[in-house]
Amino acid sequence: MKYRKKPIIIEAQVWNGVNGEQVCDFMGWRNVTIDEQGLRIHTLEGSMHANVGDYIIKGIRGEFYPCKPNIFYATYEMVKP
């Protein structure tokens, strides 16, 4: 059997290494830690590290998680306002 991913609209921010305040505002300050290792996201599955260039995705249940750019571009396209 084959399945198609349901079309959903998500919110996301790119972590560029210097936009910590913007990312924290997007995620809520309790969901993220920024330290000498970079950005650490507190997810439903535990703590995950985001590299510079990763997208931070807000899931359909309000959860946050990092996504590599190549996976992001293969999965999502920009929605025009």
Image (cartoon, rainbow, N blue to C red):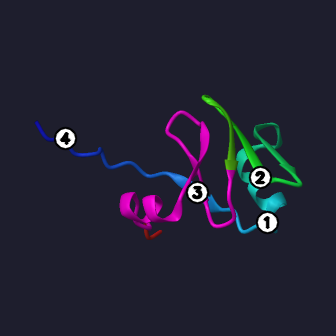
Amino acid under disc 1: Asn
> Between residues 7 and 37, which one lies in front from this camera angle?
37
Residue position for label 2: 39
Residue 76 to residue 5: above or below = below
Q: For marks 2 and 4, give the one nearer the viewer.
A: 2
Label 2 residue SS: strand
Badge 2 vs badge 1, beta-carbon distance below 8 Å = no
Badge 4 vs badge 1, beta-carbon distance below 8 Å = no
Closer to the N terminus: mark 4 or mark 1? Answer: 4
Residue position for label 1: 19
Residue 28 placement: quadrant = top right
Q: Is residue 68 magenta?
A: yes
Residue at the image position 62 percent from the left and 29 percent from the top: 44
* Magenta-colored span: 50-78
Closer to the N terminus: mark 3 or mark 4? Answer: 4
Closer to the N terminus: mark 2 or mark 1? Answer: 1
Amino acid under disc 4: Tyr
Residue position for label 4: 3
Residue 71 to residue 58: above or below = below
Q: For marks 2 and 3, give the one nearer the viewer.
A: 2
> Between residues 60 and 42, which one lies in front from this camera angle?
42
Closer to the N terminus: mark 3 or mark 1? Answer: 3
